[in-house]
Image (cartoon, rainbow, N blue to C red):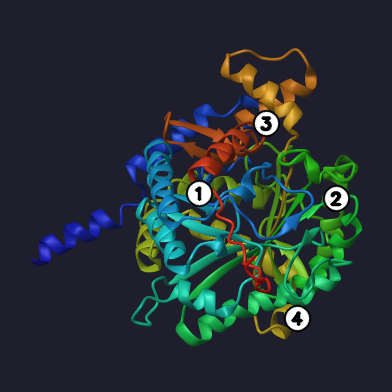
């Protein structure tokens, strides 16, 4: 390639905005209900939503109360070919309808029940469709499985980075070594062990990771949230997600009055664990009745927000970021290429530099130079999230009305319709070309889907023969 051709290729590669991605963002923004098109809204301004798989491996080997699985989920065997085929189809539809880049969750049952090669193949399929995949697990697997997932047959890494979300709470029964935890604190060593496997993977093979920690909240563990945050904040997790339990999935596992753990009560406990107020109105991910998010970092044992919602200068930085960098693709872009794209934006809008320096100076003042020096200027990015799923009894009729183009007169169902319309978490149905909110998937579609899968992929029970003593012939 000649110099002129190389320069043209570099110019094209470092163009800040992908037209297809920008168009997808504009479409997504236009689809949002007017009420959620706030200055804080991320959807349609710096992302399109979160995506998830369904019906690809619904089986799980723990028994949890509560659980979003339908009754038939554990009657479906895990089949690698089925998983690969359906992940490809679902990602293909997401690629067509939601643009060239996104975050997608490999989820549905317990991902570690997939053989490592099939698990790796699913991740590669997702990346081939422009998705940054995250595998969802209960974390009850060994380093050998992780290593076989991360490395190819020749012993070299298949991936430069892996993302996992691990679910830990005391209502998950059957974990090895702790069949029925009596408290969340008893699970701390298991949370640590899980994170340490990924630290070892990086030390031995250079494979980086991003880890999220998930926890279902009921009245039975609400008052343990704060201690979970304090005990786990330095273990290596970059995100802590808490989900107040909802009445969906297998009703046989509904053991408490889940709604006593209100969103405000859950968020207050997260704040108690973080030791500070967590302002979830700086950034919105869809409807705040569904999602609350606080982005920030730890300096030592204290958490600080990236942006102070009470400071108009910080809010101006947020608005400037959306305006100038919102349509830049960060996900999956190599660092050097991303730097080139950001530099071109800065050259075009030089006012970004003083705004960024002002933000940096304010942040240093908030944290304190002494604290930064004491911690050798090392900070750890940690995000706090709460996802409020809705009950099946509300979602089913609300979705029926939405499908008919009607709006309910009932305030509760109308709220459900509004939240579904702004959903941040979407699942694809290639068979009819539609995208559905996760609450609809779990409340309305999972039961029939898993019943069909039970026929397609039945669990084959293998019984060990009983050796009976020989009898004399008569």
Q: Nearer the viewer, residue 36 or 224?
A: 224
Residue 359 placement (x, y as % from top left): 62, 60
Which comes before the other along the chain, label 4 or label 1? 1
Callout 1 environment at 10 Å: few (<14), some (14 to 19), or many (20+)? many
Report the Cα–Cα distance between label 2 and label 3: 22 Å
The C terminus lies in quadrant: bottom right
Residue 328 visible to the viewer: no
Check the image and report above or below for 184 versus 418: below
Q: Which sits earlier in the primary sequence, circle 1 or circle 2?
A: 1
Crowd rating for badge 2 (residues with CA inside 10 Å; few <14, some 14–19, many 20+): many
Quick one: label 3 or label 1, which is nearer the N terminus? 1
Q: Which mark is residue 218?
A: 2
Q: Looking at the image, do the residues carrying marks 3 and 1 touch, with CB atoms under 8 Å apart? A: no
Residue 419 - label: 3
* Mark-to-mark CA distance, 2 and 4: 40 Å
x then y, percent, for residue 31: 52, 27
The residue that label 4 is drawn on is 370
Which residue appears at 75% of the width and 66% of the height?
303
């Amino acid at each position: 390639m000649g110099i002129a051709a190389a320069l043209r290729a570099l110019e094209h590669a470092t163009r800040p905005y992908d037209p297809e991605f920008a168009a997808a963002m504009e479409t997504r923004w236009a689809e949002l209900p007017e009420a959620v098109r706030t200055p804080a809204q991320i959807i349609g301004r710096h992302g399109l939503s979160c995506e998830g798989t369904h019906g690809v491996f619904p089986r799980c080997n723990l028994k949890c109360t509560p659980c979003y699985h339908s009754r038939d989920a554990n009657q479906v065997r895990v089949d690698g070919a089925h998983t690969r085929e359906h992940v490809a189809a679902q990602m293909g539809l997401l690629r067509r309808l939601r643009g060239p880049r996104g975050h997608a969750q490999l989820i549905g049952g317990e991902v570690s029940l997939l053989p490592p090669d099939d698990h790796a193949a699913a991740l590669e399929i997702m990346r081939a469709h422009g998705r940054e995949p995250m595998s969802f697990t209960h974390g009850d697997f060994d380093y050998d499985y992780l290593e076989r997932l991360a490395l190819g047959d020749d012993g070299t890494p298949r991936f430069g980075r892996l993302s996992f979300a691990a679910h830990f709470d005391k209502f998950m029964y059957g974990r090895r070594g702790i069949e029925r935890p009596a408290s969340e604190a008893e699970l701390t060593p298991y949370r640590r062990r899980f994170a340490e496997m990924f630290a070892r993977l990086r030390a031995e093979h250079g494979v980086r990771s991003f880890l999220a920690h998930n926890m279902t909240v009921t009245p039975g563990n609400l008052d343990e949230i704060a201690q979970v945050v304090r005990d786990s904040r330095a273990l290596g997790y970059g995100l802590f997600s808490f989900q107040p339990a909802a009445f969906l999935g297998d009703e046989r596992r509904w053991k408490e009055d889940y709604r006593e753990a209100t969103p405000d009560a859950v968020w207050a406990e997260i704040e108690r664990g973080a030791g500070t107020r967590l302002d979830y109105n700086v950034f919105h991910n869809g409807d705040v009745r569904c999602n609350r998010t606080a982005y920030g970092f730890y300096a030592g044992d204290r958490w600080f927000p990236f942006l102070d919602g009470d400071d108009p200068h910080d809010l101006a930085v947020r608005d400037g970021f959306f305006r100038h960098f919102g349509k830049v693709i960060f996900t999956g872009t190599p660092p050097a290429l991303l730097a080139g794209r950001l530099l071109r934006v800065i050259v075009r809008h030089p006012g970004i530099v003083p705004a960024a320096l002002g933000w940096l100076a304010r942040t240093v003042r908030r944290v304190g130079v002494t604290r930064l020096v004491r911690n050798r200027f090392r900070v750890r990015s940690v995000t706090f999230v709460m996802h409020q799923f809705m009950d099946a009894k509300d979602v089913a009729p609300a979705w029926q009305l939405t499908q008919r183009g009607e709006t309910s007169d009932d305030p509760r169902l109308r709220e459900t319709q509004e939240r579904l319309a702004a959903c941040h978490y979407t699942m694809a149905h290639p068979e009819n070309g539609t995208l559905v909110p996760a609450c609809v998937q779990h409340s309305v579609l999972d039961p029939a889907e898993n019943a069909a899968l039970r026929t397609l992929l039945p669990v084959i029970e293998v019984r060990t023969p009983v050796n009976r003593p020989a009898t004399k012939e008569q």
